[in-house]
Image (cartoon, rainbow, N blue to C red):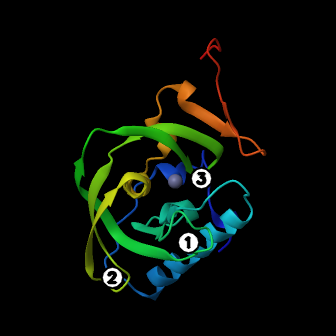
Amino acid sequence: MTAKDIITIPNPKLRERSKRVGHIDDEIKQLAEDMIAATLDWEAGREHEFGAALAAVQVAQLYRVIVVRNDFDNKADKSFSVFINPEIVKAEGEPVEELEGCLSVKDIYGSVARYPKVKVKALNLEGRPVRITATDFLARVFQHEIDHTNGMVFVDRVEDPHKLFRLGTNGKFTPVRTGSDPQ
Ligand code: ZN
């Protein structure tokens, strides 16, 4: 798969719930590989952005599968972890607002409140249960991707249009809406 396989809003599939994976077969393993390839291809074409993670619905496959980059600080590390049927079992702390983007929402970023710490359970590609305690950006990524598996896109969590920003070709953000604009 390539970046062209990534669907974007308003594709209605992005608002559908994905189904749980019962058996991790070759089709699911291939899907995970395809998702990683699509994410890296997307990143290769975008100078100012980082492909942190992807959910299967974003390549139009309604399975609860997400891939998450292993190192968010190093673009040269192109390895990912795969999580099957991920769910948040516990969220802790006061939600924190930070800018967030999505491969399915072209050039728009939004300030979204997310818990600073979450406990996630999932299966790995071998079908073994894994539990992760994620904090800060990783916690945000899990909340964003698990939202995708439930048919929710980050912009659905941004009620105030002043909290949306457009990424310019110069890498800078400008408000989508300014103070006195009509709604
Ligand atoms: Zn996303």
Taking the image as shown, residue 105 lies to the left or right of residue 32, namely right
Task: Tell which of 104 and 136 is nearer to you.
Answer: 136
Image quadrant holding the C terminus, namely top right
What is the spatial separation of the Cα atoms under label 1 and label 3, in whole angstroms? 13 Å
Q: Which amino acid lies under the numbered mark 2 shown in the image of this protein?
A: His
Above or below, comparing residue 183 to residue 116 in the picture: above
Q: Which mark is residue 104?
A: 3
Local secondary structure at mark 3: loop
Count of marks, rendered view: 3
Mark 3 residue CB less than 8 A from any atom of ligand 1: yes
First reached walking from the N terminus: tag 2 or tag 1: 2
Q: Which mark is residue 23?
A: 2
Mark 2 residue CB less than 8 A from any atom of ligand 1: no
Q: Position of residue 168 (x, y in %)?
A: 74, 41
Local secondary structure at mark 1: helix
- Residue at (59, 41) in percent of width and height: 109
Query: Of circles 2 and 1, which is in front?
Result: 1
First reached walking from the N terminus: tag 1 or tag 3: 1
Q: Which amino acid lies under the numbered mark 1 shown in the image of this protein?
A: Met
First reached walking from the N terminus: tag 3 or tag 2: 2
Q: Which amino acid lies under the numbered mark 3 shown in the image of this protein?
A: Ser
What is the spatial separation of the Cα atoms under label 3 and label 2, in whole angstroms? 27 Å
Q: Position of residue 87 (x, y in %)?
A: 29, 61
Image quadrant holding the N terminus, namely bottom right
